[in-house]
Amino acid sequence: MSEGQSDDSIAAYEERIEALEAKLRALEENVAASAEQAGHGFDWKMWGERYGLLIAWGVMILILGSVKPDQMFAWNSYATMLGSNAMVVVLTLALMIPLTSGDFDLSVASVMGLSSMLLAVLNVKMGMPIGGAVVIVLLVGAVVGLINAFFILYFGVHSLIVTLGTGYFINGLILWVSDSATIAGVSMGLVNAVILTRLFGIPIGFYYALALTLIIWYVFQHTSLGRRLLFVGRGREVARLSGVNVDRVRAGALMASGTIAAFAGVLYTGMRGAADPSSALAFLLPAFAAAFLGSTAIYPGKFNALGAFVAVFFLSTGIMGLNFLGVDSFVQNLFYGGGLVIAVSISQLIRGRRPMD
Amino acid sequence: MVQRAAHGDALVIRHLSKRFGGAVALDDVSLTVRRGEVHGLLGSNGSGKSTLIKVLAGFHTPEPGAEISLYGEKLHLPISGVDARAKGLAFVHQHLGLIPSLSVAENFFMGSLSTGHNWAINWRAAHRNARRIFESFGLALAPEAPVASLSAVQQALLAIVRAYEDIRIATKDHADRPGVLVLDEPTPFLPRAGVEQLFGLVRQCTDQGASVIFVSHDVDEVREITDRATVLRDGHLIDTVVTADTGTEAFVERIIGRSMERYAGAGKQRKAGAPAVMIRDLAAPGLGPVSFEIGRGEILGLTGLIGSGFDNIPALLYGARGGTSGYMEVADFDADLKHLSPEIALSRGIAYLPADRLGEAGIGSLPVGDNVAMPVYHTLRGALGLTDRSIQRHAARLGGEAGVKPNVPAMPLSALSGGNAQKALMAKWLQTDPSLLLLDEPTQGVDVGARQQIWDALDRTAAAGTPILVGSTDYEQLAQLCHRVLIFSRGQIVAELSGSGLTKDKIAERCYRSMPQAV
């Protein structure tokens, strides 16, 4: 009986070896093929991956437009949508930076809420000029990032836990400084500078978000700083042994995240001329969904600013269309929540098949 | 060699063979472990000794025809772990199988906790019980202490006592079966005093009638502790000898084999002149203090058995590990190793290529181009900043020179074969024209062709004056590549080989002996 078993196991071994050899051959052919493709010829698959989200966006507009052409094909709808999502773009960019260097920052939406409220308190209640208040608020965002970095790097606590805690702590601070009330009457200067001034019918806040997107795209793609950020996120030990000061890079990413999230809060207050203690928190999930969905587009397989920009408007176009169809507001949650899980699954698929762009 | 399975024998193995595909790992091995004896099992890497242990532990199914019996009772093959334990066979592997964050007592009773159902554990009684057992072995271990707080020696002793107790409990109904304890290389990471303590414990076990199989690389240790010893080479049982009648030379000869094809060393002559690198009083856990020098254009090899301490040296000289002390002089740079970091080392032109190719040396998910260009990003900036095009053009040029195939910088590093990835990563550092190149197992998992290309590249680099340090356990590589090789044992340099004295066999011979001796 043991003889039979061993024969079986030899056969099984041989089968496995043959299968492995076949795999190896396939792999070699694959490598040769991709080598050829890289040299010349048009790679349709890669093109499809890069621009798939843009195409899906267009298709979605056409489908929704075929049902509600008056609203879906009106420039005004888009001008409003682009303007009112500026702070979502900015918040997504904030989140994307530590994600690239390998840390989660769950406190971004809280920082956005804090900066929004703090700006109103300083400007309305304490009578500080709006310019000075904005500078202070941005500094506070950077300090929150520094505090996150301290706990993550000095104590070695996982970023998920630290930022979950600091985020919740900040929510408490917001309620404290605002007495849990909405503060209205923020300087018209800010409202003018964010939403009332329009270019091609689109509120100027959108162009701030666009400019920031381009800046971060440039830093990620065309500076050694951006490449180092990616190195740290993908292989901390490799980066360290290649002479990168990993802790400094991670701390810098978290501080940038805090500062940019605070800027999102400035836009948010400017857009409404007021600040309330809780609504900003609802933007955490849309930002995550957009960051991950964005990582499947333009430069598939890595978090990138252009992809995130497209993703924000892909998601908000979908929600706008569903609103036009008269669907209840709970659809937002379905759309963003489902979008996040699907986006992460797709990006995993891309990574599994082809680890990089 | 026909032996009758006497009733007095503890473990009898007959006609044990094991093949993996076409490769023969064990070829008709027969050996007997007597009651109350310490039986050594010796052999180099690939000799088949780990396969033998894995068959006993039930990881491998032996080829048909093998017979293994314990105290006269035939074991069903493949051996089931539960069955073997119940019959009195226990293992202590090199990694000990302890959970550092749990207490000594929790670890000690792990066997009964993980298999039995006990709804009312009385920890006070358990601690008392553990303390009594430790005392009976003369061990001062606190049952409440977390295992992480114990020294390496105490952890090893705990693992051995635990295995021995497991045997005792399993065989308590059979007074005639004191059990067989397999110690699979327990000593390499222990200091000399700890090894003596461990041997004392082994003797206590055998005094009570148990048998011990002691697996080791180290001839001196085997000569000290074992009664008899079996030497394996290339899957064959070479000899089973009575230890007291066998000298060190005779053991080494059996392990490395005189019939083996002799690889002549390259016989490279060491260049004269002032040393380019001086290392003084280098010390770290398990190492040193040691001092040595590397000449201009010299390739210096470091080797020794596992645990001898040499393997960390390339990383230590790069400031990549904590807990280092000592001084290094490279060119006009005086480094206090206590404060050295990779960032500083790199700024002084020191380059380090770790052995762990996709864990420490390169990032598999990023393109070859980025991996290669990383140290020289600042030189690749154009008017628009860094572009994929400039990175890839640079990497393609380097890859072409280094013979990377396929030479496509946009491909992820993980898509390259081991040899080609290593050529690319080597090129990453060679382009910086380092003042000192530190290498850890530079051709591990690299095919023969790529290996030669990497050696050639290193020869050219050394010829241009760069001092190179190579840590490796590949004796053939060291003999071919190096001008000089230092051999380590227990954290100290015990021998230096160079010129015509630098051959694969000589290196092996010196490595298998743990005691320093006059050359």
Image: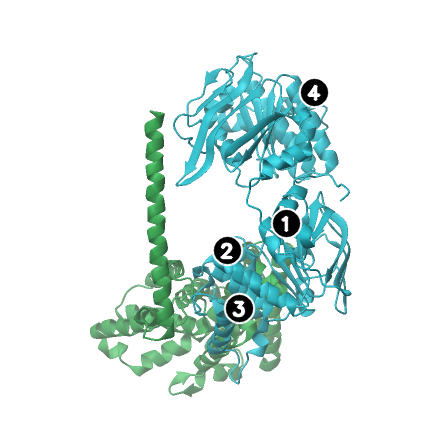
Q: Residue at x 50, y 21 (%)?
A: B86
Q: Residue at x 65, y 33 (%)?
A: B250
Q: Chain of mark 3?
A: B
Q: Chain of mark 1?
A: B
- Amino acid carrying mark 1 in the image: Thr
Decide: marks 4, 2 in contact (CB < 8 A)?
no
- Amino acid carrying mark 4 in the image: Ser
**Residue A25 is drawn in which quadrant?**
bottom left
Q: Chain of mark 4?
A: B
Q: Colour of chain A?
A: green
The residue beneath circle 2 is B446
The residue beneath circle 4 is B136
Q: Which label sits in the foreground, 1 or 4?
A: 1
The residue beneath circle 1 is B503
- Mark closest to the chain's N terminus, 1 or 4: 4
**Chain assigned cyan:** B
Decide: marks 2, 3 in contact (CB < 8 A)?
no
